Each structure stands twice: as structure tokens, then as C-alpha cells.
Image (tube, rainbow, N blue to C red):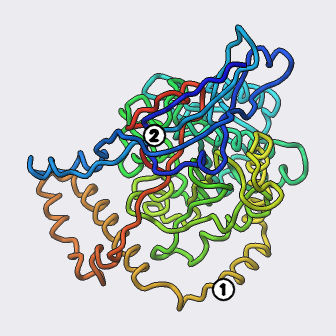
Amino acid sequence: GVEYRMNIINMMKPDSLFQLGMRPLRYSEMDARNGVGWIRCAQYICYFANQYSYVPTSSKKKKSTPAASAREATSTFHTLTISVSFPHDDDTCYIAQCYPYTFSMLQRFIEGLVAKYSNVVRRECLCLSCGGHACDVLTVTDLSSSDAEIASRKVVVISARVHPGESNASWMMQGLLERVLASDEDAFNLRRALVLKIVPMLNPDGVILGNYRCGIAGVDLNRQWSDPTEQHMPTIFHLKRLLRSYVQQDQLLLFCDLHGHSRKHNIFTYGCEGGRNMPRLRERVFPRLLADCAHFSLPGCSYKVLRSKETTGRVVVWRQFALPQSFTLEASFCGADFGPGAGLHFNTKHLREMGAAFLPALLALVEPSQARVNAIMAELEASMPASNVSDDEDDTLDVAQDRDADSVARRRSGAGGARGRRASTKAAPPAASRRKSLPEAAGKKKKKNTLAPAPSAPRSAGIISPRAERGGR
């Protein structure tokens, strides 16, 4: 067929998996009649800096004089060039970065689950999105038990698609749901031990509109967790309220948000290390349990809490709710760089297998003897003794948490008016009395935010707005 060269000229990241062999997907309506779905395509792929520049959003928000504004640093846009051949005349084709997973697909999938497994899954509406679409929450547990027994079980909350372009997260979520609703003994034991609260699509507006990163209000919903408003980000507001209710009842065991990643290979987790009154190294146990899955990369996991991530779901749930087991699970848009699958792209089967790996990992977490968990903790203690923990790192976490506690206290006292807020602020101990100031604790070196995915659905394969392209988890 005729070869077409396409250029997307406003990519914002300095590097991409397209530089490391990743190829886009093509769907042909003619091929689909013969049972052929999404296949990898493109004969020529190049990702490079171009001549166009922009002022980063973070710079625009800073107050400065006109003279300083004139000297503001700019960043360079990048171009993604791909050459694609189409095999048939008079055909309709679609190009995507990852296997699409639409709102309609999710609705059909959930309807099928509820019809087939009504005794173990219940569907409810968490809330309506800004665009008026239902944000579903599924409860998976043994519903034949008494209310008292269900109320005594620990709760695991799992969400996906806060970033609408990361459709690989939905494929992992589908694999998870298929596995925990199965009729075998392991799935039965999990449902008897836990209550799973699952939000399969946290940003339905963004998915329906074909957005890559934002919702209908034009903001990244995974940067709104600190103080979400019901009016502008209702799905985050109501999910956070749900989490808080389980924390107050001492039921919340684990929170995990599923994502896609456009700059790293493999599937891995981001967690949160340290924190006062939290068991040391506990955040490293669940990733080790997930590592039983051949697609999961334990060396790829990270537990550092960067300042640029302070308002994400993972960090806010960890910090405000004192939950050590708060994670994001990241799946590469490309594939693995280790093991039998090295150099190959992930397909939907691989992603579903990763989702299914949650079942044995969660079973090990709640197993009465805690044999596997204790063995992992002993191994971690031996390899990472407490004396090796950096004092500066502890101070960074302590000061950050003290600041959060002060903020909560000020909000609570705010019910008494401005006078109450001023009194609360004066009553808070100065930062100097909390061992070190935040800049001292954080150190001089500040890591650059480098994590961000790229478009996935057919509409997202076109020009992506700079605002939607920014940021990582």
C-alpha cells in the first residue's frame, strides 16, 4: 500500500519509548472482517527535538517582573514521526499507541459480570462525573455472609483510568476482575477474607472525550487529591471520602491505582517509604508478592516520594491516612526488557495476566499465619537494616507529615472563623523545632519530574494539547 508519513510536533517529553523500539497499533475495518484486530505497524519511527518551544506551566504560575518574564526559560517541543502503510484501498483505519478500552466496552463488561456473578459482585454508582456520566464502583466479596461478617473484613481499594489515555490500565483491571470473580478455591478464599472496592474508570469524561490526561475541567485529576472539590472533581472527592470511611473503621488494608507508562519498560509499582508511626519496609512487601508474575519487574519499583508527586492519590492516601500500602501499578506502553518477553510488546493477554496476579498477592497478605509476609520482612530487614536509613530522608518525611498535620488542624479550627485560623497557625510549632527545615531535609538536589505517558486511543493519536501531555504519576 501507499506509505504515509505522519508528524506529531508538540510532544513535550525529552525522550520516549518510541526511541527504544516501541511501535504504534493499527486497526483496519477490512482486516477486522477476517478476524484481524489491532496489530503493530510503522516502518519508520523517529522522536527528536524540533524548533518549537513553550513556557512550562510551572513557570507561568510563578509571579515575576516583566524583566524576569522576558528571561523565562523555555522548553522544546519534540516531534514523533511515523511512516505507516495501509494494505487496502477504500479502507478505514485507526492508529493508537495502546490497545483502546472505551467507556462502552467497560459498560458491557460490567453488565456481563453482574449478570453472571450476582452473588459475589455488586455494582453501584460512586457518583456522577462533571459530564454527567456514572462512575461505577464494584464491591467484590462473598455477599452470602452476614452483614457483621462482611463488616469485619479488611478492604482493598483499586482504581484505574484516572488518566484516560492509559488504556493498558483497563486491560489489567479486566484481568483482575476476571480472576477474583472466578469459581476456584483461591478466588473463593479471597472473597471470604476481603472486600474489594474497585473503581474501573475514575475519569469517564476524559475517556469519552478522547482526552489523554485530563478530565472535562481540563486538569489532571491525579494532581487534585490533597483537597478535591465535589463540584470540579467529583470522582476524586467521593473516592477519597470512601477511603476515609474505611480508615475510620480501621478496615483499609491497601490502595492501588493502575496506570500506564510511556518512558519505561516493564510493569512495576511506585510506593511510599518511611513515615512516622508506620512499620518500616512494609511498603516493599506487596511488590515482592506481585513479582511472582513473570511480567513484573521488582528492580523497576521505586518508593521515593518526590515533591512533584505530593498531590497524587498514592502519596495523599499514604500521608493523610497513614497507609503504608499505597501504590500505583505502572504498565509500560511498550513491553519488557528482561526475561522471556524481553524485546517484545505487551499485548492484552499479558496485561490481563498482570491483573490476575493480584489474587495470589492479596491472599498472601491476609493469610492467617503470615508465613510469606514474615519471610519477606525478614529478608528485607537483613538486606536493609535500620542503621542504613538516611537521617535526612527520615527528616524529610517527618517535616512533610508535620506540615500536613498542621494544615489539617488549621482547616478544623477554621470552623470558628478567621480568628480561629490565625490562632491555630500561631499554635503550630515552628519548622525549626521539628529537627530540620524542609529544604535542609530534602537536600540540595531536586529530581526532575520525568514520568509521563503518551496518547493511546485513536483520537489521542493526533495532536495532543501541551496541557494534557504534562506530568507523571
Residue in front for this viewpoint, 85 or 69:
85
Give the CA distance from mark 2 to mark 1.
Answer: 41 Å
Amino acid carrying label 2: it is: Met
Left or right, 100 with respect to 9, comes to right
Q: Quadrant of residue 336?
A: bottom right
- Compared with 91, 204 (above or below) is below
Residue in front for this viewpoint, 416 or 210:
210
> Residue 377 location, x and y as percent?
69, 79
The answer to whether residue 237 is seen in the rendering is no
Sequence-earlier tag: 2 or 1: 2
Residue extending farthest to the front is 2
Q: Residue at x 66, y 31 (%)?
A: 101
> Residue 158 location, x and y as percent?
62, 48
Report crowding for label 1: few under 14, some 14 to 19, many 20 or more residues within 10 A (C-alpha): few
Name the residue that disc number 1 marks.
383
Q: Residue at x 80, y 42 (%)?
A: 349
Name the residue that disc number 2 marks.
11
> Residue 383 location, x and y as percent?
66, 85
Residue extending farthest to the top is 90
The answer to whether residue 101 is seen in the rendering is yes
Residue extending farthest to the bottom is 387
Residue extending farthest to the right is 184
- Compared with 411, 229 (above or below) is above
Q: Residue at x 78, y 46 (%)?
A: 350
> Residue 329 location, x and y as percent?
62, 54
Amino acid carrying label 1: it is: Ser
- Compared with 196, 284 (above or below) is below
Q: Which quadrant of the figure contains the N terminus?
A: top right
Left or right, 434 with respect to 271, comes to left
